[in-house]
Each structure stands twice: as C-alpha cells, then as structure tokens.
Amino acid sequence: MKRFLQPARRSLLRAIPWLVLAATLPCLPQPMTAAAEPTPINRPWTGPYGGVPPFDQVRVADLGPALEAAMEAELDAVAAIAAHPAAPTFANTIEPLERAARDFERVQTIYGIWGSNLADDAVQKVEREMAPKLAELADRIFQNQKLFDRIRVVYETRKTAGLSPEQQRLAWLLHTDFVRGGAALDTEAKKEMAAINQQLATLSTKFSQNVLKDENDALVIIDDAAGLAGLPESQKTAAAAAAEARGQKGKWVIQNTRSSVEPFLTYADDRALRQQVFEMFVSRGDGGGATDNNTTIRQILELRARRARLLGHATHAHWRLENSMAKTPERAMALMEEVWGPAVAEVKQEVADMGQIAAAEGATITIEPWDYRYYAEKVRKKLYDLDESEIVPYLQVDKLREGMFHTAAMLFDLHFTPVPEGSVPVFHPDVTVWEVKDGQGKHVGLWYFDPYARRGKRSGAWMNAYRNQERFEGETTTLVSNNSNFVKAPPGEPTTISWEDATTLFHEFGHALHGLCSNVSYPSLSGTSVARDYVEFPSQILEHWLPTPEILSGYALHVETGKPIPAALVAKIKKAETFNRGFKTVEFLASALVDMKLHLSTPTADPDAFERDTLAALGMPREIVMRHRTPHFNHVFSGDGYSAAYYSYLWSDVLTADAWEAFTEAGGPWDPAVAKRLKSHVFSVGNTVDPADGYRAFRGKDPGTGALMRKRGFAAAAE
C-alpha cells in the first residue's frame, strides 16, 4: 500500500506534519532557547510563481537554527493573539492564527524534505535534536489557556456571528484539534500528557531511523549471473547499476526497497535467492540488534494508551477515529471483517492454482511466501496468457508521466509544462519541476517530481505540499511534489517499472491533483487536509485511469521500438484485472487488522508474538505475510499518521469503487459531467465541507460495499 505523507498539519499547527505533531511534547514555561539568529532558510520565498523554496541555499547546519528562529517567531505571534484586548472574533483570533503559521511552515517544509529525501547521518542528528523542540512548540500552543479560551468563544458563537460556512468549518476544526490535543484538560493532566508526548516524539524518531538504516544498509549482492535467471533485462540492468553505485561493479545488487524486491520475487528462478531477498525485506526493524524496533513499539503502544485514557477515550483507536469518517473502531473493524472472509477464500484457490503449476514443473515444494509472486505470475500466464514481463517494457516512467498529464487535462482542465531550466531550485539533480495552468492559461501551481531511489531517502512513495493554496489575504498558489523509489536505469536509458509501480505512480499523482485542484480560502482547509480515511479516495480513484485504453495506447510505448502497447495485450490486462486480488487484499488487511487490534488491546510486552498470535486467530494464510510487518510499519509507528487508521485505504476504496461506477454508468472514464462533479465536490473543496456531505453531493447517494466487492472480484459476496 502506498504511503501518503500528510502535506500539512490542519489548523494552526499545519506547519508541523501530522506524522510528527500527533506525538507532541511538553509545555514548558521558560523560553525554548536563547534567541536564535535567522538563516537564509527563514527568509520569505522569492522568485517566480509566487516564490519558491530556496533549495540551493540550504545547509544542513542551518536546519536546526532556522527551525528555532521560526518557532520563536510563531510563539511570539501566538502570544500576541492570546493577549488581544478585544473580545474574541473570527477576525482577531482565527485568521491571525492562520497567518501565524506561515513563516514556520516554510522552514518546516525544507526540514521535512531533507529528512525524507536526503537523510544522511548529519540530517538524522538534527532530527533527533529537533524532535523534542518541535513537539514542545506544539504543546506550548495547545496548552495556552488564554488562546484556547478565545478559540472556544469563536467556536461557540460560530453559527450566530455571521460567519461563512467555510469560516464556521475552520472554527469547528480548530476547536476540535485543540481539545484533542489536550487543551481542555486540567493542569495535572496537561503535565502528564506533555510527559507522554515527549517520550512519543523521541520513540517515533528512533523507530523511523532504525527502519531507514536497515533499508540503507541491507542488500543482496549477486556475483554469479546464473542468479539472475528469469529476470527481465530491465531488472538485470537496474541491478547492475545499483551494484556499480555501491562500488560493486561487475555484480548485481537487490536493494532493500519494494521497487527492487518485488520484481525479483516475481521473476527470479533461483528459489534460495528469492528466500534471501524476501527475508531481508520482511525483517527490517526486526533483526534483534541495534535497529530492532520491538521494544520501541511496546513503549509507543503503552504511551498511546495512557494518552487516550487522559483524553477520556477507552483506547488509542477510539481517540484516533473520533474525527474520522468511520467515527468508531467498531465500524472500521466491521468493514475489514466483511472483506476478510471472501479474500481468504480467494487466496486458498490462488494457492491451489500455484501448487498445480509447481507440481507440473516437477517442483515438489510447499508454496512459501517467497514463492507466491513467482508462481502467481506463472498462473497469470497460464490463465490469461499474460506475462507481466511483457508489460514492463511498455511502462516507461517518462511516458507514464505524460499519460498522467493527459488524465489531468481531460478530467480537471489542468495542463503541465516544464519550467525553464535553472529557473527553480531543486534539492537533488533527479528532481524536475513543472508549471501547472488551467485551460484559460491561469497559473495554478508547481509540481515537483522526484522518482528515483537513493541512499538516505525513505522507502515508499508519497505526495507532499510545499505550500498550500489559499486566498484569504490574496491568491496563493500551491506547490506540490510526488516522490517515489523507482530503481533508476543507467545514464541515457529510460527507466521502466512494474504494473504495480505504475499504479502507485498514478495513485500519488491523485494526491497531487487533490492539492492542485484546491479552491478554498484558508490554508488549514486546503487540498489534502481532510480526514485520514477520506484522503486516500482522490488518489485511489486516479489509479483507474492507468488501464484505460486511451492511456495505454497513447503512453504505454515500448522502450525499444516506441510502438504503443498492442490492443491484444491491453485486452489481456483488462481480462486479468481482478487476478490475485485475494493475495493483495489479504496482504493489506492483515496489516490493517493487526494495527487496529494492537491499538484496541492492552499493550503487549512482545509485539512479534502479538502479531503472530493475532494472525493465527484470524486464519492468516501461511503463504502470505503482512504488507507491512509491525517492526517496520512506518505508517503506524513513525508518528500517529496512520496509527489505528491503516484501514483508511479500504474505507476510501469503498468510495473509490462506487465513484468509478459513476463513470462507468455514464459516458465512461472521461465523461465530462461526472468529472466536473468529482472536481467540484471532492478535489476542490478540501476540508470546507464534511466529507460524507461532499461525497453525497458528487454521487447523489451514500456508498455501499457492493461496488468494492465487485472491484476486487468478490462478486458473490456482494450479492
């Protein structure tokens, strides 16, 4: 499952990413530091397009001082708001709070980019030093009683004060966030919560850095070409390039990233090597040494449970889902359990099909997790005459990018052109920048694209917003990015990717379009700043355009011949679209169920044992492991972002499947009327409306699970 990095913290503290903010630190009455001197990073962004991040001026040594100076400035602004002599109003309380975060947000953006994309030892040292200071900032604001009293007055009078619906929504959101952050607790409870949060911030940083170290340091080196048997040429070339980059010229390296591991597990004939690569990947954070995360997980769970009780909730899961679409863990569990049974039944049939092929080939084996993708690919070829290695040469990253641009133009009238070379600084030579305009030629924003894996870059794929769209003090356009970890081809050669990676590419671009379509007044309500179990809906719906004939025939071009993918091959892809859905659903749901059950249970002393016992009780097929095992589950333990909320992908996919049927019931994938409703009621409104109301306005009804079951090939269960 793709990982989405929330681009900005909602409301006042939007500048601190949700993954960090949810583990805030203690309120301290004394000044945070001696007066910090501003650095070049602290200056307002200048240049074209309403100003751009000064990536060419960033020094790691400046990151800490820049954050401290920005934090001091924000605290000064907040103190002035809290001390305002006039009665609280939206204009003198809420709007100044929106304004107060801007300067810090700029610095935090740059700090976050270095931490996610360029995290060498020096950057990680800054992260460890700054985590408690960042969280201290959050608690000092949340626990400012005078400030909260003013917010509460505006919230309580929001419906009688002549505020617009968007302003009422912002007052509600801000008050809700403060209450959830402990603002309404008594003094002693605030102190206890602050102590809990201090430890959580440190532990989350430790967790994510341990995972990154395992991903950076672990690899499988192949020195005999025989070990590459079965791999497509593109994968062999990429493995050779990875080896050369690590000083192993003449050999081949399988890196500890999904985009490197999964193709190897799919095609490599050498079963022992498949097992070695598989075990390297699934043991991240679980090696028993310095990077083992099990003790850290136990400590995080204990602290989250204590914090939830302080805030009046039975468990962390109940606190986490309070302001989600699901509202309660019980509703989320009911959805997951409804899908789990049909998915497990499907896996049994998939394994039986694989066993038949293995036996026919003379392999007297029991299917193991490192065999699943390999034999599933053989089943696909047998049942559908479709070998994914036939597809990969047509999936060039640069061509697919153009296909995404075509999709954006057809659906949302957004048009992408590269910025003039050198006109916009970038943080790495791999990054390219594109200007986005609407159909009338009006500037909408910039899109930064960083597609390739590198040492120091966290794994997975994500979207981020460097600046949110807003207009309450003049039009401000957005800056968004997409970041991936594709294995880069040698210089001068195009990079090709798997079908799953291509789907991920479209998924993350859906997040970017969510930000680019935003049309709201206040930055805290902008773009992707929506409920966690709604934010994946705009990204998941965009995945559906990848397999459309228009995109495949126009942009899936062969890496050598340049010819479009044959219609016969497109037809095979269409026919096999529900293939292996049991595996994909169980792999995801196992992670989501363990996440939820961990946060509904009394914290365990042994997370590995809890994972093992929970999966056994669920009837987890032995041939599959969780997509994200607990010791490297960054979604859940590098911060609170998806804690007790990994189910969100499934909840959003209920909406996605139903929304796609709105297109198929109308004029097809490119139906302009449906696309207009999708933009008007989903992609452009941010958090200005309740997501359930927004979806209802788009679809004309509430979604059910029938479309989801049909999408995943569980049609019988949908009847």
Image (tube, rainbow, N blue to C red):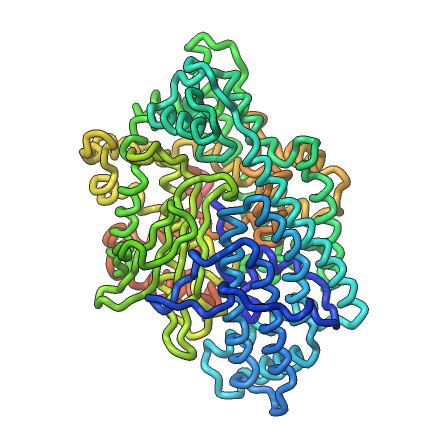
Query: Residue 483: in sight, yes or no?
Result: yes
Number of callouts: 0
Q: Is residue 690 left or right of residue 28?
A: left
Q: Position of residue 136 (x, y in %)?
A: 68, 64
The one of 701 and 685 positioned closer to us in this rendering: 685
Q: Residue at x 19, y 34 (%)?
A: 562
User: Which residue in the rendered view is the most extreme toward the right?
Assistant: 188
In the image: residue 475, left or right of residue 343: left
Q: Is 483 displayed left or right of 130 in the figure?
A: left
Q: Residue at x 52, y 24 (%)?
A: 220
Residue closest to the far top:
362
Q: Confirm whether residue 689 shows in the render.
A: no
Q: Position of residue 71 (x, y in %)?
A: 60, 68
Q: Nearer the viewer, residue 304 or 660?
A: 304
Task: Tell me: residue 105, above or below residue 280.
Answer: below
Q: Nearer the viewer, residue 273 or 131?
A: 131
Q: Quadrant of residue 53?
A: bottom left
Image quarter hosting the C terminus? top left
At horizontal 55% and vertical 22% (from top left) the residue drawn is 276
Q: Is residue 393 above or below residue 440?
A: above
List x then y, in percent, for residue 111.
53, 57
Rendering coords of residue 133 (x, y %): 66, 61
Query: 169 left or right of 320?
Result: left
Residue at horizontal 23%, vertical 32%?
558
